[in-house]
Amino acid sequence: MKRRIVQLFSLIVTNSYFTSIPTASFYQGTLKGACVPILNCYACPLAWGSCPIGTLQHFIIVRAFPFYLIGILGLIGLATGRWACGWLCPFGWFQEFIYKLKVPKFSAPDWLRHMKYVVLVLVVGVVSWVTFEPWFCKFCPAGTLEAGLPWLAWAARGSDYAEGMSFATQVFALKIVMLVALVALAAMMRRPFCRFVCPLGALLGLMNKISLLQLDFDLDTCAIAYAQGSDLENCATCGHCSRNCPMDLKVPEQIGSVDCIRCMNCTTTGSAFWRFGTAPSRDRTGEKMNEPAPHWGTRKVPAQPG
Amino acid sequence: MVRKLVFTLLAIVLSACFVYGLMVEDFWETLSNGAMICLTCIGVA
């Protein structure tokens, strides 16, 4: 619930140029020079800030090293890893919202997670360099939702609808198809765009292992394990944390992985907990832990009273 | 110890990148790019 409020707040803060609605204009002031650490299209009529992936492509196209962008994204990643993906990104929230639809759910193969690095290097990097065009933007479903559709609505407003539609290109039709496909996927699996495609998540995730904000796992403090007593041999028989993970991670094994978005959903049972610092993993008592989770399958259940 | 060292080195390098980026006017480059909507990119023109 707390995360939902923060996500809503983030959505409003990053997209609150409401002057654009009556004037059919968009924000062009100084704040557009600031990159937000989320996939928020800067072509959105309500947006204040710039999309880091759009900016990265721009710098690649103009053949300049993006010192400022790398610095700001790197520092944010170094402080919190992919926390922004879980708590601030409106497109991630949108996918979580769609996932609540009552349709059959399924998991995707784990290797698909590596696809986002291919997107980052090939589509954002190589293709932009070679073609001088920001091709990721042309097919970004977040851009279609946040910018393409509002701009098309604007083009249609004040004139007849057909004239507005004439602005739409074949690229736009393809973007709509991709957005619809993503919405369908998001209804059936958890955050597919964030897990398999998002180049920003790929960049921020690189910092997960060394960021100040860390998540650790200590089964000795799991409320469910305690309640179920010694019958619970290991987490595999429970899976409560993993079922709650919006990134479909196997929480005890993958809690600090590059895909963890620090949403804190897994902390509800007490086995997972967050901490700040660069020191190696420790349990709640401060005792040094071996990685990965040392109590996997060898949990010592606290003695039951009586 | 290694983790702390890597963290410190990265923090220094990234801070330097950020400050240098501001000095060479990357901020204004970002602003000029963000303030110019690419209608062909969003596919409506």
Image (tube, coloured by chain):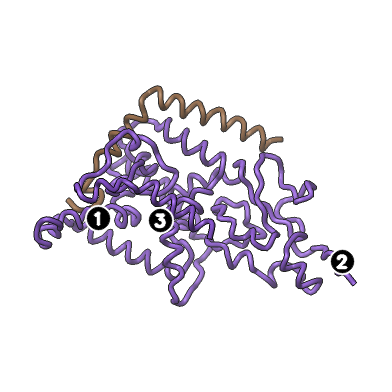
- Name the colour assigned to chain B in the rendering: brown
- Residue picked out by circle 3: A91
Residue A81 against residue A295 in the figure, above or below: above
Q: Are marks 3 and 2 on the same chain?
A: yes
Marks 1,3: beta carbons within 8 A: no
Q: Earlier in the sequence, mark 1 or mark 2?
A: 1
Say which residue appears at 13% left-offset and 57% top-offset.
Answer: A164
Type of the residue with mark 3: Phe
Query: In this rendering, would A223 be left or right of A170?
Result: right
Type of the residue with mark 1: Pro
Judge by depth and name the residue closer to the eye, A40 or A59.
A40
Supply the letter of whichever chain is purple.
A
Say which residue appears at 46% left-offset and 25% top-offset.
Answer: B19
Q: Earlier in the sequence, mark 1 or mark 3?
A: 3
Give the letter of the chain under mark 2: A
Give the letter of the chain under mark 1: A
- Residue picked out by circle 1: A150
x and y percentages locating residue A114 in the rendered image: 49, 54
- Give the distance between the C-alpha atoms of the residues marked 1 and 2, in whole angstroms: 60 Å
- Residue picked out by circle 2: A303
Q: Are marks 1 and 3 on the same chain?
A: yes
- Give the distance between the C-alpha atoms of the residues marked 1 and 3, in whole angstroms: 16 Å
Badge 1 element: helix
